[in-house]
Image (tube, helix red, strand yellow):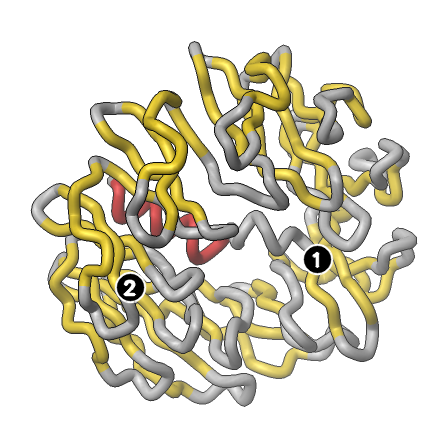
Amino acid sequence: MRIMKCTIISRFLTSAVVGLAAVSAMAGPLFPFVSNNRWGYMDKSGKQVIGPQFERAQNFSGDLAPVRMGHWGYANTSGKIIINPQFDQATSFREGLALVELDHRWGYINDDGKYVVNPQFDEAHSFYSGLAAVESAHRWGYIDKSGKLVINPQFETAGDFSEGLAFAETNDRFGYIDSSGKFIINPQYEDARSFYSGMAAVRVNRRWGYIDKSGKMVINPQFEEAQFFVKGLAAVRINRRWGYIDTTGKIIINPQFEDAGEFSEGLARVKSGRRWGYVDKQGNYAINPQFDEAKSFADGLAQVHLGRKVGYVKSDGKYVWNPIN
């Protein structure tokens, strides 16, 4: 279960830090929207740039985005199919390559649609700092962009490289490795997260704290859950409620939310009364809880859901694309 969780986070959530929209050098940010069960793309003002025509649509990375028409392929910012639909799953391009699945095996293509690394892995992550975590025969290792194994499969779980280190699990304990596969911080934690802003969340005796890149515990384990730091704040859970701390461990926003996300563009998504809204860094609501789902802000907009309907709001809570469309 842990392996699947890490893979999903890496492949599709893309990060949460990056957000929903991607910037095309020519067209500016484009946002996937849905109308009458078909997906298209709009600009920041809500104007349709690519009319709804796809079964599903993901974020642009550069000038290409994964779209599904029976199978997954890639369209450009004009809506033209550049890489024919042929994959069972597909992800946005990262570091020049895209992770795709065919017949239950994962590989990597370039922006011409040609395989650079043939589908062969049971699971895989996108490239970070020139390396990608891949799973084969229930063990994780790392390949470079030619597909060469540079760190042999040996880990029970492996994360993406961030700030020069990646978490890895061996014998049910997590530590951190460098790009040669050497443990820089020895396996000793029950669970671990990637480094951001020089700190990483780790779990000890069922409580989460934070270490620095030397492995020193800088915020003692005390939280039920902990997320990564973004611009000095991290979401943590205390007594089943989420709040926010600063890099010293001081509580900045009191634990009060059912769930919470990272800050992006000055606002964080939070859940209260089974509905999602957004708070500022003082913990005040900028947008009251009203959505069934909510994503982080990116390029001035946030994707929100009402039931199965998808919309976009600005930071003042006004719709650019109303979910009832």
Image quarter hosting the N terminus: top left
Q: Residue visible at 73% across and 67% down?
A: 23
Q: Residue visible at 16% across and 48% down?
A: 187
Residue 14 placement, left or right of 221: right
Image quarter hosting the C terminus: top right
The quarter of the displayed image where residue 322 is located: top right
Vertical order, 183 against 268 (above or below)? below
Vertical order, 278 against 111 (above or below)? above
The quarter of the displayed image where residue 107 is located: bottom left
* Mark 2 neighbour density, 10 Å: few (under 14) some (14–19) many (20 or more): few
Label 2 belongs to which residue? 104
For marks 1 and 2, give the CA distance: 28 Å
- Foreground pick, 210 / 133: 210
Q: Which of marks 1 and 2 is nearer the N terminus?
A: 1
The percent position of residue 256, horizontal first and vertical second, equals: 58, 12
The percent position of residue 207, horizontal first and vertical second, equals: 30, 24
- Considering the numbered disc 2 on the image, is that residue within a helix, a strand or a loop? loop
The numbered disc on residue 144 is none
Q: Residue visible at 50% across and 65% down?
A: 91
Label 1 belongs to which residue? 21
What amino acid does circle 2 point to?
Answer: His
Regarding residue 92, the answer to whether it shows in the image is yes
Residue 64 placement, left or right of 8: right
What amino acid does circle 1 point to?
Answer: Ala
Q: Nearer the viewer, mark 1 or mark 2?
A: 1
Q: Residue visible at 85% across and 60% down?
A: 43
The quarter of the displayed image where residue 52 is located: bottom right
- Foreground pick, 279 / 102: 279
- Foreground pick, 189 / 138: 189
* Mark 1 neighbour density, 10 Å: few (under 14) some (14–19) many (20 or more): many
The percent position of residue 145, horizontal first and vertical second, equals: 37, 83
- Considering the numbered disc 1 on the image, is that residue within a helix, a strand or a loop? loop
